[in-house]
């Protein structure tokens, strides 16, 4: 087998491991909202969320309906943030989690969004990727190097 071909395979394996994680902070939203259609609390918070989305369009808002396949992220984020998503909406902003609708939650939401706008908060979704990046990358890089070594020594 040609050494150039083996190197190409190794580079492809490494790229497969790394490329999904490149630019994660840039493309992921700062505000992630889980809601349920017809939910009264969701309807109460929607105008506030839409107002903040228009005012801070550079932050990125992502709305995920509870029946959407991406709704599984709710449980992963809830575990990471240490909250119980007992009712909707469940909102993650930077390092803040908000469950349900109330005046205090609205004020907390406004405060968290304003803080993120001024300090460039990471997306809540980045915390989910953080632990997976080194292991997946290390595993595939190690595998690629092993294949390269075996083929070059043979």
Image: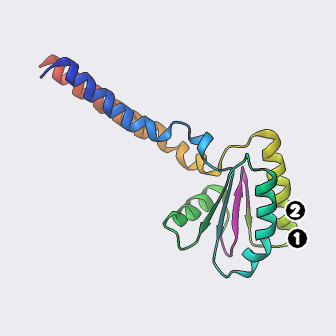
72 lies above or below 53: below
Quadrant housing the C terminus: top left
Residue stretch rendered in magenta on the structure:
85-97
Relative image position of residue 47 (x, y in whole percent): 80, 69
Image coords of residue 98 (percent x, y): 74, 64
- Residue at label 2? 107
| Relative image position of residue 4 (x, y in whole percent) | 22, 19
Q: Residue at x 56, y 64 (%)?
A: 75
Quadrant position of residue 24? top right
Checking the image for residue 147, the label placed there is none
Q: Are marks 1 and 2 in contact (CB under 8 Å)?
A: yes
- Per the model, the C-alpha gap separating discs 1 and 2 is 6 Å
Image point (51%, 36%), residue name: 22
Q: In the orientation shown, which residue stands out farthest toward the front?
A: 54
Placement of the N terminus among the 4 image quadrants? top left
Does the magenta segment cover residue 89? yes
Across and down, in percent, residue 101 comes to 79, 73
Is 57 a magenta residue? no
């Amino acid at each position: 087998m040609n050494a150039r071909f083996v190197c190409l395979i190794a580079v492809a394996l490494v790229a497969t491991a790394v490329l999904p994680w490149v630019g994660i902070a840039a493309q992921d939203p700062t505000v992630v909202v889980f809601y349920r259609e017809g939910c009264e609390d969701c309807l109460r918070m929607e105008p506030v969320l839409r107002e903040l989305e228009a005012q801070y369009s550079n932050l990125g808002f992502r709305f995920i309906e509870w029946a959407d396949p991406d709704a599984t992220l709710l449980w992963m984020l809830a575990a990471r943030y240490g909250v119980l998503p007992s009712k909707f909406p469940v909102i993650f902003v930077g390092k803040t989690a908000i469950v349900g609708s109330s005046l205090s939650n609205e004020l907390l939401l406004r405060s968290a969004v304003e803080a993120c706008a001024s300090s460039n908060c990471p997306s809540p979704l980045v915390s989910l990727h953080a632990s997976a990046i080194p292991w997946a990358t290390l595993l595939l890089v190690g595998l690629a190097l092993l294949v390269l070594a075996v083929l070059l020594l043979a």
